[in-house]
Image: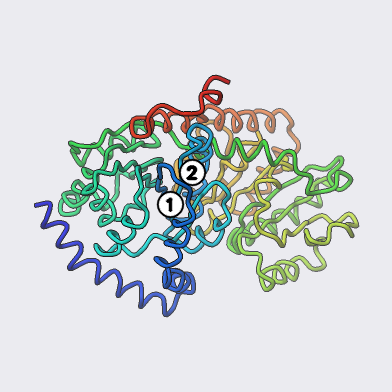
Amino acid sequence: MQRLWESAYTVLLIPLLWAGIRILGLFNQKVRRGIRGRKHLFEELSAQVSRIPPGRRIWIHSSSLGEFEQAKPIIARLKELYPDLRIVVTFFSPSGYEHSRNYPLADAISYIPFDTRSAARRFLDLLTPDVAIMVRYDIWPNHIWELARRGIPVVIANATMRRQTLRRFTFLRGFHRHVYNSMQCILTVSEADRQTFGAFRLNHPTVSVVGDTRYDQVSIRSRDARRRDLIPSRILRNRKVFVVGSSWPEDEDVILPAFLQLQEEISDTIMILVPHEPSVDHLEEVEHRLSGKATTIRFSALNEYRDERIIIVDSVGLLLVLYAYAHIAYVGGSFRQGVHNVLEAAVYGIPVLFGPRHWNSQEPVMLLERGGGFVVQNSEELVRTLRNLLLDEQAHSFSGERAASFVQTHVGATARCIAHLEAYLGPPTHMEVITR
């Protein structure tokens, strides 16, 4: 039966997937970048691998940038505990690869090749890893099966599995059981995830709950962010700052009217607006909508600040630092396809607001349950929520404390993950780090 699954996937499904990707690439720029980026994959990877110093190798694969944020605390801790460990990082998505090409803790960084049997063999012949870690959910069967044939341990870190997943359907369940049974260890984010994996009746990998390393990552990054000085103190002195992170136009349709009303009522508030895609066209559109209604300035022009009420951020990569200035935060995406990362704001101990489409991840739901987050359905609700949190210091403090506590109680997944990896890597070699 196992050979049947492998043959059906390789002979029937892979050609269809490849044809679909090629067709999609005609219309989607991101898919096109991924295809082009793989054109010389093996030549470029071979050159990188040839420069890696001797030592054991671990392969860590993430689908995209968000999953790689979950991998970073694991990588950093592995480098501390095993200084001789060589780390190779791969991505499926262009966004992950292009933004991480200069990541300093990796010895090699590449796209993962398309999941044909021959590509998987060639890739692993080049890489020769001692352990492979897949982050969260991006599992490529031919690579997994080839790792298993070579006796290389495979671990899923930060594993998640929704109860409604199609993978649990009768026909697909047997296929995925074979894929997961080719692994050694599945480390889940929650008990609910562990139970969902249990529906596959796996007989080979151990399935354990370790938590989510994103909490560790935002905690580490927030400590670093607090030391950065992006905005002159004179601008924020005696101000209440409302930071809007990763906003899409659908979010801004709600946020901009709300803030225009609020600025008339509470004179000491300013808004820092961080669009998800700060293209020139979008920035000009936002400025046009606010023209004559509110004073605005772009982040890049803050040296010329003249008491403007709205700062529009025209750079990328600053959001986590900007949340450190916030009295209240709104996290975007939740009037579109799904809310972005609420942990990046909650870690600072501030109330976190978002829209109705927040069921795409567990964190906003849990933040709501604990009183650290608030859902707003429209501009009117946003005005009422902001007014309450800005004017009622007790309500603001209570919510902020709940948000900070929520993040801190979930820190520690990295250490638990490393404890499981020791079974394949052996005892840590850097004893000073362990005992400090």
**Amino acid at circle 2:** Gln
Q: Residue furthest front?
A: 54
SS for dot 2: helix
**Amino acid at circle 1:** Ser
Q: Is residue 305 above or below residue 134?
A: below
Image spot of residue 408 (x, y percent): 56, 29
Q: Which residue is painted at 89% across and 45% down in the image?
A: 234
The answer to which of 59 and 321 lies nearer the viewer is 59
Q: Is residue 358 left or right of residue 350?
A: left
Image spot of residue 77 (x, y percent): 51, 35
Coloration of the structure image: rainbow
Image spot of residue 56 (x, y percent): 40, 42
SS for dot 1: strand
Q: Is residue 307 left or right of residue 125?
A: right
Q: Is residue 426 left or right of residue 408?
A: left
Q: For the residues labelled 1 and 2, say whether their Cβ atoms are less than 8 Å apart.
A: yes
Q: Which residue is painted at 49% across and 43% down in the image?
A: 70
For the C terminus, give its image quadrant. Answer: top right
Q: For mark 1, what is the residue? A: 62
